[in-house]
Image: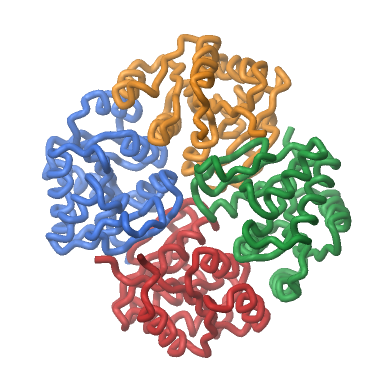
Chain colours: A red, B green, C blue, D orange
Amino acid sequence: MRKIIIGVMGPGANASQIDLQNAYELGQLIAQQKWVLLTGGRNAGVMDAANKGAKAANGLTVGILPTDDTNTVSDAVDIAIITDMGNARNNINVLSSDVIIACGMGAGTASEIALALKANKKVILLNENEESKVFFKNLSLDSIYIANNPINAIDIVRAVLSEGRDRP
Amino acid sequence: MRKIIIGVMGPGANASQIDLQNAYELGQLIAQQKWVLLTGGRNAGVMDAANKGAKAANGLTVGILPTDDTNTVSDAVDIAIITDMGNARNNINVLSSDVIIACGMGAGTASEIALALKANKKVILLNENEESKVFFKNLSLDSIYIANNPINAIDIVRAVLSEGRDRP
Amino acid sequence: MRKIIIGVMGPGANASQIDLQNAYELGQLIAQQKWVLLTGGRNAGVMDAANKGAKAANGLTVGILPTDDTNTVSDAVDIAIITDMGNARNNINVLSSDVIIACGMGAGTASEIALALKANKKVILLNENEESKVFFKNLSLDSIYIANNPINAIDIVRAVLSEGRDRP
Amino acid sequence: MRKIIIGVMGPGANASQIDLQNAYELGQLIAQQKWVLLTGGRNAGVMDAANKGAKAANGLTVGILPTDDTNTVSDAVDIAIITDMGNARNNINVLSSDVIIACGMGAGTASEIALALKANKKVILLNENEESKVFFKNLSLDSIYIANNPINAIDIVRAVLSEGRDRP
């Protein structure tokens, strides 16, 4: 029986302190809901923080890695999917997630939001980049949600899932 | 000897009339410079228009196709690269282009701009979506250029190439 | 903490009865070892049988799907990774597996064995296709193992893992 | 108008002298037919030799590169498609080729033959690895052809193309 997978996407190298705190809390909350956490899997930034939060709450974590360099995998990833396809793996991140939470902002995160919209996925923005909210909301009014904090983000995920998961 | 490849990215289904005109003119101008045109290859929107413009000027055209359905390939594509990897092919589009021109805006185009920035490529925006200019310029001040029209876009490409192509 | 992942690769449409029995038994045995089962994820042939076996023994199952058509996912897959990249996903299958067991033979399976050898992974052949054993053993003497039955295959996996998992 | 693309696949590091000679001659012959040559694009082994042969006959050459390290691109590649997806790009190699010639043998080449068969492409084997001929012929009687030399391989390509190219 397929488990519900929630993707948390966010910057690796340039995550802010608030992004990292939010990511950790999102990981915890996702695990507490018995959802699987999916991230880009690296031992950096939002990915690492979200995985650590999920493991602190005994969750299950999946990382979709861009390279086959296993030294870059977060210690808090349970299931490492090695794509060796660089940022093309961002498309797998979003296709494999029932709902996506973008925690923070950067070029990689922006690509994941855009690819998610292209795939008709719902995306929740949790960040302080106001330009990103204006741009993506304008790009797809119905698929972008704005969250004020991690608990709010999880509430939105729950609402989106109850409307019918993105599966036929 | 590797040829210079200029990528033109833009909407398929929802391209505006001005996007289509710009794309056709970009294709012509790229061909006149003896550069190779690279697009997403489908027989729709900006991709198709740019390829037709390039062929009208006797250019060489490369299409990076998302599926293996050969009925969707633009008639004006000379070299069809069949990826069968959906929108993950957007990463190949930008990695294979020396410079990228985003003609119009949409979720797919936004993903290509973001993936290009992630790969340290220069991107020229030619569109009427002001939010996109604010957002991407904010995301990467040094790598985003704003063009007013196709001729201006080609002038910027030439300047970027002369600064040293994105090759070691 | 990364879990050990064992990949079981084999034909979808043209699996033989013995392939299906072997796949089911492999799934059970892998689950009993507390390893994660990884397959191509579709509800067909060896993939489906292995996943069913693993779930019958309360295992955890990961499926790496070639398309985004969720109707084709095996009911016995817990974690569905949607690649939408067709058979290019075969490379992800092998890169993500600590050891690969090829159960049965076909073009897709042969591609996975070859890609695994290219990535310096160990591959255990469990099939009745003698030509495949000669060919692949000849291609890579040190990386190909021949198993007589599922229990034997699992014994070889255990020996390979104890020699040092394919991780730095 | 789509050009006819002939793929030449073969070992990089471990190509034999005869493989390299055959590859160079195949490149020349393909160019003389006005077909486009497609290879894995690296400056090594069969890929490099085939591209050099094609350029010696004024052909057009496309390389599908596994990494974004532009130092590894053959000097004789005109159009470099940068996938950055490692050996998963082997699937693009075969999907983009109207007919595939496997020149020499190795794990990567074997994966390309198998992926080509999976995609219902015709493959011509030109090598001295008898086990490979037995195995692949057994795997797909109708899609595998055995060539004795480069001229014979080109004759088979021409016959396959005239039967109706692999396009709807």
Note whether residue D45 is visible: no
Kindly indicate the quadrant of the structure image that contains residue B129: bottom right
The vertical placement of B10 against D111, above or below, is below
Picture quarter with the N terminus of chain C: bottom left
Q: Position of residue D147 (x, y in %)?
A: 45, 13
Left or right? Give the position of D24 relative to C126.
right
- In percent of the image, x 34 and y 38: which residue is there? C108
The vertical placement of C53 against A125, above or below, is above
Note whether residue D155 is visible: yes
Q: How many marks?
A: 0
Left or right? Give the position of D150 relative to B41.
left
From the viewer's side, name the closer residue of B120 and B108. Answer: B108
Kindly indicate the quadrant of the structure image that contains residue D133: top left
Q: Position of residue D163 (x, y in %)?
A: 49, 20
From the viewer's side, name the closer residue of A71 and C92. Answer: C92
- In percent of the image, x 15 and y 45: which residue is there? C155
- In percent of the image, x 51 and y 61: which residue is there? A90
Q: Position of residue B152 (x, y in %)?
A: 88, 58
- In percent of the image, x 50 and y 60: which residue is there? A91
Left or right? Give the position of D51 relative to D88.
right
Q: Position of residue D103 (x, y in %)?
A: 49, 21
